[in-house]
Image: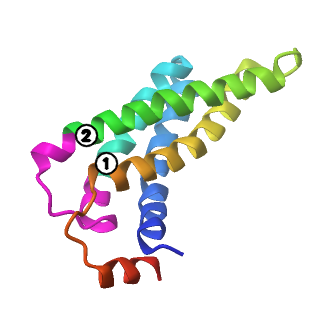
């Protein structure tokens, strides 16, 4: 398995714990909407993600000034694609199920969307934000082990 993907998953677990905790607190304790809760929770997780992915996952030495705007673009793009798609999938699957509460539907949408977001975000971070143009062939081979 690819080492960067494994490190990305470890970092993802940390920022997911923070992000999902805030999402569910905002949804259920404070009664905020799906969109406000997921946006705030993902924003907090993204802050952790940037720091850890830059330093641990991708070991980037690139400019922070250049990588932060691209990071924001990637996470926002991934967020809107994943959380729109997750909500639509749950709405489509459970549309006619009136006995299922809106809260439960939102909870399922958050979980599905988080999985989609993780996959999209990994490729966006690796290919656009923290790409390493100077990686040697040997480093690439070690990365894949």
Residue 32 in the image: above or below residue 86: above
Image position of 128 (left or right of 23):
left
Q: Position of residue 54 (x, y in %)?
A: 25, 58
Please tell me which residue is depicted at 42% across the width and 36% down the height of the picture. Answer: 42
The residue beneath circle 2 is: 70
Residue 38 in the image: above or below residue 63: above
Callout in the foreground (2, 1):
1
- Is residue 63 in the magenta section? yes
Image position of 50 (left or right of 35):
left
Q: Position of residue 123 (x, y in %)?
A: 44, 51
Q: Position of residue 26 (x, y in %)?
A: 49, 27
The residue beneath circle 1 is: 128
Mark 2 closeness class: few <14, some 14–19, many ≥20 residues within 10 Å? some
Asked which secondary structure carries label 1, the reply is: helix
Please tell me which residue is depicted at 65% across the width and 25% down the height of the picture. Answer: 87
Colour mapping: rainbow
Residue that extends furthest to the front in the rendered view of this protein: 137
Q: Quarter of the image holding residue 103?
A: top right
- Specify the segment rendered in magenta: 51-68
Are the two marked residues, 2 and 1, in contact with CB atoms closer than 8 angstroms?
A: yes
Q: Main secondary structure of the magenta part?
A: helix
Please tell me which residue is depicted at 88% across the width and 15% down the height of the picture. Answer: 96
Please tell me which residue is depicted at 82% across the width and 26% down the height of the picture. Answer: 93
Q: Position of residue 122 (x, y in %)?
A: 44, 53
Q: Nearer the viewer, residue 12 or 79?
A: 79
């Amino acid at each position: 398995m690819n080492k960067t993907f494994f490190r990305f998953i470890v970092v993802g677990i940390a920022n997911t714990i923070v992000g999902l905790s805030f999402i569910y607190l905002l949804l259920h304790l404070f009664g905020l909407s799906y969109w406000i809760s997921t946006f705030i929770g993902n924003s907090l997780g993204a802050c952790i993600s940037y720091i850890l992915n830059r330093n641990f996952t991708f070991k980037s030495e690139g400019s922070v000034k250049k990588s932060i705007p691209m990071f924001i673009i990637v996470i926002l793009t991934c967020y809107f694609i994943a959380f729109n798609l997750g909500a639509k999938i749950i709405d489509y699957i459970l549309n006619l199920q009136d006995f299922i509460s809106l809260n439960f539907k939102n909870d399922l949408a958050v979980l599905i969307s988080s999985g989609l977001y993780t996959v999209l975000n990994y490729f966006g971070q690796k290919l656009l934000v923290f790409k390493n143009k100077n990686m040697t062939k040997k480093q690439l081979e070690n990365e894949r082990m």
